[in-house]
Image (cartoon, coloured by chain):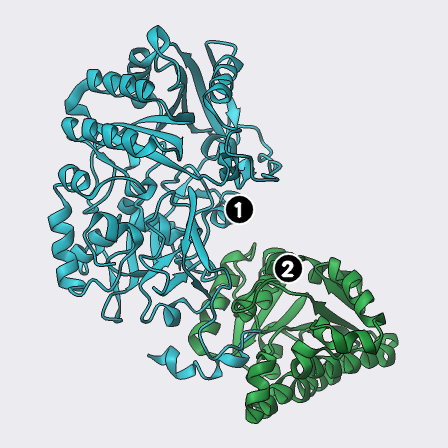
Chain colours: A cyan, B green
């Protein structure tokens, strides 16, 4: 309220002087998988004011699919990335409160040298805190630490009726756990308070091994999980036969101060992908060549040593805009989790299906997840998560339908943050929690004012 | 450095204040909106290597009667400041200004008259203590009378002339005046406009500005490409300026 009162004076606050809402000139918006849609976003530091009446918030646009895209071009979308102030940090507890647009890369830059790190990081540091909550991101340490939401203590949100309120695991807990992993559909996240973790050094001790097939992989993941707090694997999902599911397993932990190198790792050179490749550049032949080279680049069967957190957590961040490698056709990432109850044979069958259907690209990641978190729509559950990038092609819809049918059979589910092609009926069948989430929306947003292209596609919202 | 940043709550002022705080300078925040000032000060404290608390005070470029008190507050908190950065200003499109004379009066008053008054307060204080740094954001729009920024450009052009004269007159006395002329920078201020080629990011501009302050430069075009662009524009003959829309 108070902010609106000063909004007439906003004109001279700093260099900002627009009495009317500033809007981005670009008339399209896109996610990381490209495929732009008509839309505009409001870009401003004054997040709390700007979200009044807005339909959707988005951060750095790193979700692959349509979760950060407007349902129709006229929907008002707010970009949070300029609202990026750190509001408080408690040196003894590690509790940090910041505006929702704060970028994880900035947080790492400031706090890693001081011996603090986010309790959970996704595979890119170019995400905002708000996005990390809305997607309830998980990382290599999911089997130990759960999702990011498990470490959030408080959220300041603007809900659909435009009131601004705080919620937490104790205050409005149902709303809180709906917003965690709720894809921005229950409210605009304005501020996030979560607990950072102490790190003993700025180095990761990484233990990696070449694994010959999917059975060996699952066994190795299982062995590494109790020994290391962080595990994940890269899988060659183009090779079939006896080497189906071969890949490289990476396990790691923070290096102890006594053993790690004394000097912190320097900044790795980061380059920007210089051009948009033609659509044919990444094809089954080049992808297979890449995979074979990558597999055998790991010459020894097993090696271990210290590596920088950037290399360990964010190998792809070294190349900005790597999504241009897919060309203008765009791409998606299929990420699902197959529950532990379905057993290893289900994972093997899934890999067989993936190889048979084709369409996969070099990027395929496997990870065993720990128990399900409290977020109503949060993705991870105990089981095996597989993520694979796929270029858009005429076959893609069929591939995704077939994979979804398989996942439904196993009792698993997909990750909304990556999705653009799942059918509503498939989603309803794999998501028994959906009625609970819709009940929350009935309470907080009965008119379904907050929506996204994804909620129209999957949740039955009106376009 | 003990620096005041007028406009540290947003855009390029925010980016400059962050660089100063992160390298260990003491920063004092001036601007409007109590809640916003408090949050920006907290952000700067969190970034300071020694968690030095950043002070703040209300200072509204539309209320020149409050300038002295704001500078007193900064002096009290910092113990005699030795650097001042002014990024605060007002922007409106030429169309909006032509349609509303009152808006024009406000813009010219804020960007020229009151900014000069603020700088005069600062100048007197800095000269009295043997000098210091005064860094003020003008604009490339002030280099030439141009159709799309006739009024905004005039307000900045006047400011540039004033800053140049300050440099000529007082450099020998220890007052280092830096006139910053940003080209198009992607901030909240320009969010409604279509970015031209060579558009910059606030963080890059801030790095350039702090470097120029440290080196005692009198003038800075940033991003650098704009020095070349404006060199050409400054020499374009009138009959061409009348024809083109730039």
Depth order, front residue of B200/B35: B200
The secondary element bearing badge 2 is classed as loop
Rendered view: A47 above or below A286: below
> CA gap, disc 1 to disc 2?
25 Å
Q: Which residue is mark 2?
A: B199
- Tell me which corner region of the image, top left, top right, bottom left or bottom right, holds residue B61: bottom right
- The quadrant the C terminus of chain B occupies is bottom right
Q: Pointers 1 and 2 in contact (CB under 8 A)?
A: no
Q: Which residue is mark 1?
A: A109
Mark 1 residue crowding within 10 angstroms, few (<14) / some (14–19) / many (20+)? few
- Mark 2 — on which chain does it sit? B
Q: Residue at x 28, y 18 (%)?
A: A222
- Depth check, mark 1 against mark 2: the one in front is 2
Q: Residue at x 66, y 58 (%)?
A: B197
Rendered view: A423 above or below B143: above
Q: Residue at x 47, y 46 (%)?
A: A126
Q: Residue at x 39, y 33 (%)?
A: A393
How far across and down, in percent of the image, does residue A60 sit? 44, 51
Label disc, if present, on residue A80 of the rendered structure:
none
Is any part of residue A112 visible from this angle?
A: yes
How far across and down, in percent of the image, does residue A270 sit? 60, 39
Horizontal side of residue A113 vs B171, given as left or right: left
- The quadrant the N terminus of chain B occupies is bottom right
Horizontal side of residue A424 vs A54, given as left or right: left
- Mark 1 — on which chain does it sit? A
Depth order, front residue of A249/B97: B97
């Amino acid at each position: 309220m108070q902010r609106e009162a000063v909004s007439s004076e906003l004109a001279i606050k700093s260099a900002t002087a627009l009495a009317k809402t500033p809007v981005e000139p670009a008339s399209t918006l896109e996610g990381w998988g490209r495929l732009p849609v008509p839309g505009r976003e409001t870009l401003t530091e004054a997040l709390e004011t700007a979200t009044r009446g807005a339909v959707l918030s988005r951060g750095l646009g790193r979700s692959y699919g349509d979760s950060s895209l407007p349902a129709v071009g006229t929907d008002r979308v707010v970009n949070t990335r300029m609202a990026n102030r750190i509001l408080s940090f408690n040196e003894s507890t590690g509790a940090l409160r910041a505006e929702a647009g704060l970028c994880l890369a900035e947080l790492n830059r400031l706090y890693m040298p001081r011996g603090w790190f986010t309790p959970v990081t996704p595979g890119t540091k170019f995400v905002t805190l708000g996005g990390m909550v809305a997607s309830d991101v998980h990382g290599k340490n999911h089997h130990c630490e759960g999702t990011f939401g498990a470490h959030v203590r408080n959220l300041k949100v603007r809900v659909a009726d435009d009131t601004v309120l705080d919620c937490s695991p104790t205050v409005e807990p149902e709303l809180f756990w709906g917003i965690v992993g709720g894809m921005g559909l229950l409210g605009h996240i304005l501020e996030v308070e979560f607990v950072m973790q102490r790190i003993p050094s700025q180095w990761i001790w990484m233990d990696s091994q070449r694994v010959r097939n999917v059975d060996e992989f699952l066994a190795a993941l299982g062995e590494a999980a109790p020994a290391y707090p962080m595990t994940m694997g890269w899988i060659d999902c183009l090779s079939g036969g006896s080497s189906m599911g071969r890949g490289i397993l990476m396990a790691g932990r923070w290096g102890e101060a006594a053993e790690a190198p004394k000097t912190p790792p320097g900044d790795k050179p980061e380059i920007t992908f210089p051009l948009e490749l033609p659509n044919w550049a990444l094809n089954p032949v080049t992808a297979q060549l890449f995979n074979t080279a990558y597999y055998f680049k790991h010459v020894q069967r097993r090696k271990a040593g210290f590596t920088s957190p950037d290399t360990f957590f964010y190998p792809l961040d070294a190349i900005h805009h790597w999504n241009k490698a897919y060309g203008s056709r765009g791409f998606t990432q299929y990420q699902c989790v197959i529950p532990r109850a379905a057993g290893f044979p289900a994972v093997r069958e899934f890999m067989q299906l993936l190889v048979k259907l084709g369409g996969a690209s070099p990027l395929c990641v496997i990870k065993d997840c720990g128990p399900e978190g409290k977020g109503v729509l949060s993705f991870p559950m105990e089981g095996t998560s597989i993520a694979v990038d796929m270029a858009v092609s005429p076959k893609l819809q069929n591939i995704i339908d077939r994979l979804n049918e398989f996942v439904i059979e196993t009792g698993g589910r997909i990750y909304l943050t990556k999705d653009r092609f799942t059918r509503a009926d498939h989603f309803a069948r794999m998501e028994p929690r959906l009625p609970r989430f819709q009940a929350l929306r009935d309470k907080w947003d009965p008119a379904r004012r907050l929506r996204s292209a994804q909620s129209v596609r999957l949740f039955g919202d009106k376009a | 450095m003990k620096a005041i940043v007028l406009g540290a709550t947003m855009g390029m002022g925010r980016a400059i204040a962050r660089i100063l705080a992160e390298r260990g300078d003491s920063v004092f925040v001036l601007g409007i909106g109590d809640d916003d000032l408090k949050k920006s000060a907290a952000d700067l404290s969190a970034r300071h290597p020694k968690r030095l608390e950043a002070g703040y005070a209300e200072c509204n470029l539309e209320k020149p009667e409050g300038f002295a008190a704001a500078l007193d507050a900064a002096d009290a908190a910092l113990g005699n400041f030795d650097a001042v950065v002014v990024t605060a200003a007002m922007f409106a499109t030429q169309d909006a200004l032509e349609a509303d004379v009152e808006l024009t009066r406000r813009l010219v008053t804020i960007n020229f008259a009151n900014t000069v008054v603020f700088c005069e307060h600062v100048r007197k204080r800095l000269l009295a203590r043997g000098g210091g740094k005064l860094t003020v954001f003008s604009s490339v729009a002030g280099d030439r009378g141009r159709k799309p920024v006739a009024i905004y450009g005039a307000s900045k052009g006047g400011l540039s002339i004033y800053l140049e004269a300050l440099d000529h007159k007082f450099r020998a006395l220890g007052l280092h005046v830096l006139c910053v002329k940003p080209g198009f920078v992607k901030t909240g201020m320009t969010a409604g406009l279509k970015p031209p080629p060579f558009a910059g990011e606030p963080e890059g501009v801030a790095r350039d500005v702090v470097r120029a302050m440290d080196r005692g430069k009198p003038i800075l075009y940033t991003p650098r490409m704009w020095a070349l662009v404006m060199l050409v524009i400054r020499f374009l003959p009138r009959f061409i300026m009348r024809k083109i829309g730039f």
